[in-house]
Amino acid sequence: MSIFSYSHNAAMPAPCVGGVVTIGNFDGVHLGHQALLAETGRQAQALAIPSVAVTFDPPPSRLLRPELAGPLLLTLDDRAALLQQHGVDHVLILQTSLALLQLGAREFFEKILRDQLRVRSLVEGFNFGFGKNREGTIDVLKGLCAEQNVALTLLPPREVLDAPVSSSRVRTELLAGRVEVVAALLGREYRISGIVGTGQKRGATLGFPTANLSAIATLIPGNGVYAVRATTDGKTWPAVANIGPNPTFGENSRKVEAHLIGFGGDLYGKYLSVEFVKKIRETKKFGSVHELAVQIGEDVRNARTVLGAFV
């Protein structure tokens, strides 16, 4: 099982040639993506040939519409790891360039898929599009596959909670703070990671020291207080995370802070990841520091209840 990076016009990695392929951005690697990966792996295993997930770095939208491109749901490393975890032998990362994005649907199919990857079979979703201006519709893809004798499997949308799963739906739910819905769409809890920096150290004076997370590369959930699991140095702790400003102290800047329940060490400069389990409450302004401290104590108790046996 390997992860390869490919630049336009370079030689294609040999282990990726002659297999079953699925192509996409795969941001989030949600349940819909996982169905594609599983089917790709299943077909490849039956034929005793490689299974390959082809993805892009950066996503094409970063070059075509940079003003609209927000944070991703996964780092590239996490995306590649999850793609392999859910059923394919190899991950092929196409280094996105304007030259690659200028390829029309037929040119992309013939140059990348037929000539270089020598694809035996393709597995795609119902809304797949490819080539310049996404001119490669499903009907175009069907025609090219029939013409080039490439098998094609199209999977229907995966529905969760009475609606199709998609990366855009994950983002919408995440920004609304509905992390339990997000977990249902992903098949796992959503995670962010960053470096613990120095904050105002007010949490310590209140009896609840917090780790202030910076350098977060992925989309941050909506403001609020969450029951979470925090992992650092290979150990996981029950925790409470606050996302948003600190109106009690008149601060408007948006922060990500986590109190690790029962932790007594020094976290400054350490890498910390946070998995979101449930939103406990909204961000609010308190009348006094004492009221805030009382509420944080209640948040910790609520988090213990939510996290259950983990605590």
Image (cartoon, grey):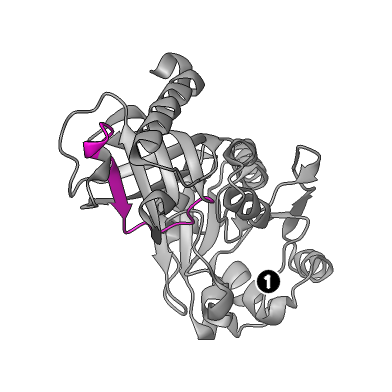
Observer-nearest residue: 236 or 134? 236
Residue drawn at (59%, 64%) of the image: 118
In the displayed structure, 191 sits above or below 121; it is above
Q: Residues within 10 Å of mark 1 (few under 14, many from 20)?
A: many
Q: Is residue 81 visible?
A: no
Observer-nearest residue: 156 or 167? 167
Outermost residue toward the top in this view? 309
Outermost residue toward the front in this view? 287
x, y percentage for residue 307?
46, 22
Residue drawn at (48%, 44%) of the image: 82
Observer-nearest residue: 100 or 269? 269
Residue drawn at (48%, 24%) of the image: 302
Q: Is residue 193 visible?
A: yes
Q: Amino acid at mark 1?
A: Phe
Read off the residue under disc 1.
130
Q: Quadrant of residue 250?
A: bottom left
Q: Main secondary structure of the magenta part?
A: loop
In the displayed structure, 82 sits above or below 228; it is below
x, y percentage for residue 256?
38, 50
Q: Is residue 54 magenta?
A: no
Q: Classify residue 53 as left or right of residue 131.
A: left
Give the number of callouts. 1
Observer-nearest residue: 207 or 189? 207
Magenta stretch? 204-222
In the displayed structure, 309 sits above or below 26; it is above
x, y percentage for residue 104?
67, 82
Question: Which quarter of the figure is the N terminus placed in?
Answer: top left
Residue drawn at (51%, 54%) of the image: 73
